[in-house]
Amino acid sequence: MERLPDLLIQEAPWAGLVMGNHALVRAMIEAGTMVVSTYPGSPTPEIAEAITSIAPEKRPMYFEYSVNEKVASEVAFGAAINGHPSAVFFKSVGLNVASDSVVQFGLMHIEGGLVVILGDDPGVNSSQNEQDNRHFCRMSYIPMFEPATPNEVYLMYLEAARLAQRRHMAVFLRLTTHVCHAREKVSFGQYIPQEFDWSPHFDSSKEGPYIAITKTVFPMKARALDRLGLVEAEGDESPVNAVLEPNGVSASLGLLRGVISASLPAMSLMENLKDSGAQLRLLKLGLSYPLPRKKILDFLRRHDEVLIVEELDRVMEAEIKMLAYDNEIHCAIFSRSDEFLSGELTSSRTMQILRQTWPEIFTPKLGRRTVEASVVPRTPLMCPGCGHRAAFYAIKKALPEGAITVADIGCHTMGSFEPYKMGEVMLCMGASSGIGSGLALGNRERRVLSFIGDSTLFHAGLPGIVNAVQYDHDFLLVVMDNGITAMTGHQLNAGSPEGGNISIEDTLKALGVKHIRSIDCYKKDELGTAVREALEIKGFKVIIAQHPCMLQFSRKTIRKLGEMPGLMSIDAEKCEKAYECSSVFDCPSFVRGEDGSISVHRELCIGDGSCRPSCPHTALELKKRKESAR
Amino acid sequence: MKEANIYLCGVGGQGIGMLSEVLIRACMEAGYDVMGCDTHGLAQRGGVVQSHLRIGEHIYTPLVPDGEADIVIALERLEAMRGALEMLREGGSVIYYNTTYQPMRVRSGAMQYPSQSDVEETVKKLNGNLHAVELEGLPDPRMQNVALLGRLAELELIEGLNAAVIRSVLKSVLPEHVLEKNLEVFSRASNS
């Protein structure tokens, strides 16, 4: 059996089917990247999974899950200014957290070179927004590579790492969800293991200043701009910025046409050109910031009409139009219509853009079927046995009318969905305490309750809590503590018993929180009573609703025993079809028959028993799986 | 078939990752250029999971365009219906495992779960071919994916994607302690 961890550190070149995230890890290893840090977030967790799949004693780098993206970036930066090639990666909105530090990177001399890897999410597959992080390179004077396929992820990381080391700077590598997760055959090069030089090379007297403040900023900024100029000159010559002509080139109606694009949309366009046979050129940018102006000007001059196809905002377009204006270029430059400013630019959608722009060249395919019927939606939900479900069920029953609930990021965000509707407003990681504080101001009528997860509490939740303690803001914070960063695949965090093992309760006590209760989520009555009592207390109070992640627990148990020992069953004589278990508690293990009867799905139920208190007629019984009939 | 779009779907936890892994490797073994992509939503369990697999010489992007799947492979009945409606091309094939995982709206009684004949009708409207798979006495429901692979091998909808190729990939991908049972299921489902 071929094993990924062995292949990743194999010295001889190899070729294999890999996803973009895994191709990246091989590139890090070949490049000799010494320090890698992250905070888990989609679409990047598989990068960390691949790194940690290599046993620590064989792992050719230092790796850590930092407490949040900002700290992860600072750790990588610190290592890099000490001369050690480093990389940091995180999800799209992770850059918002990290940006306070990252925007300074462009001003610094980074001896070892630093690659900042972003997992942007056009199409909002798993994030709050689909922010376009290309804006950040403009704000921070940091160049950006944009690979479009797993092969390019591998090659461009190597390029980015080389550039970062050669020019002693930070470089962005921007991935998007379906570049991270795409899989294809990639040919890797040789890996030559090296004895890492861990001696500290930091030298502020020679390479400084490292403190940007008041007037010191100006020369630092000038150096950053100079460096960008040098990178631009490289980009003008680099093969990563390539003119492609899959079908040759010819004028149509006397006009020469071209498209400028980058990242996955450029591949969508290649597919469109292949399908249509249209003879036009594509300028595909791999090093997209700073824009290779010479190459772009040349492309504009050679064409009568140029269309710009970029995912999300009009970032390149604005600069290219400015460039054309300054250089009195007479090429017509076309844009996407506003409907294409959001969502992924898949090949179907880039074809629509081409048709809107040049209907005489890209004629609609005839006889394409249309889909009209609708089908029952399947919304994301919490796993069977999840402590969050038990907690939401109990808390919802305990809340007074009109109470306002504030959500945060994590598995427990799904409590905001039907049927629980626990969490009516959310911004980002750790925001629930601040929002709860504000909602409580001057508010005498409606109680306020905020949720936060354990990993998020350490990530960005502490300042909101400190603030709530200082001003004794009048709301209840419920910490949904499952002891792990579950949503992104069970990474250990600062609070995890096998991770940092920092006690949340002790931390809150030390911060001066006066009212703290820790309760197991499965104890419905106790949790409900605690919520009612806490809401009677004026000021800031916390309930820690604990239960370990049951997905992780059931996986471990099944691996050991082959199946979960318990199984819920319904006593048909007692069941009065109240549907509390299936509709209000809403565990997916309950199945509603066409006759309205309720039964238990053997494959889903883990026999945890968390549903039991929900039945008003005590019809739910926990049995041994072996003894209950199929 | 020189080029093909295959769309796989199911419910989180059903083992779509293994199914797509085996299939993409088998296509590569059969000599095709491949590109694929697994996608999943927010939930670890119970949400819709999909995987895209494209074979052919000039594939540049990993996602199968809507309504252009030659083959839809579903691990569950409702997802077979959704997969067919959203992804199947006219005249394509649907292979699904006939098991059911009710979503919230069905559990609450607000909506009806589709029957087998609902799926049949949907696929018929698209002039497609439908293959429902159900294997008696599976040792573990997590082997439904292997049963689907078996039927796919038996049908050999893609030239060269036969039982011998898939069996050899199963041997290289599955951990040893579950291999034998899975190969048994595969043989039974593929009649080979």
Image: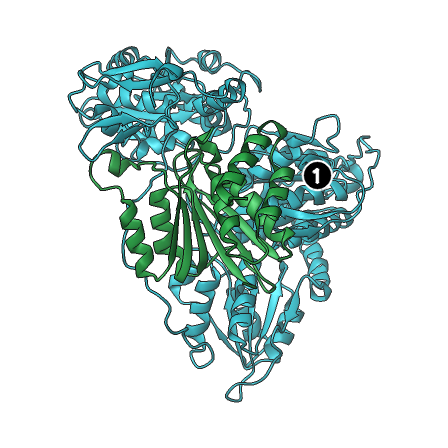
Chain colours: A cyan, B green
Can residue A540 be seen here? The reply is no
Q: Closer to the camera, A221 or A170? A: A170
Q: Which residue is mark 1?
A: A86
Q: Residue at the spot x=56%, y=67% of the render?
A: A270
The reply, left or right, for residue A316 in relation to residue A586 is right
In the rendered view of the protein, which quadrant contains the C terminus of chain A? top left
Answer with the quarter of the image where residue A152 lies: bottom right
Question: Dot 1 surroundings within 10 Å: few (below 14), some, or many (20 or more)?
Answer: many
Residue B174: x %, y % from top left: 60, 35
**Residue farthest toward the left in the current orientation of the protein:** A576
Answer with the quarter of the image where residue A289 lies: bottom right
Amino acid type, callout 1: Ser
Q: Closer to the camera, A154 or B182? A: B182
Q: Closer to the camera, A213 or A256? A: A256
The reply, left or right, for residue A196 in relation to residue A270 is right
Determine whether A455 is above or below B73 in the image. above
Residue A591: x %, y % from top left: 28, 30
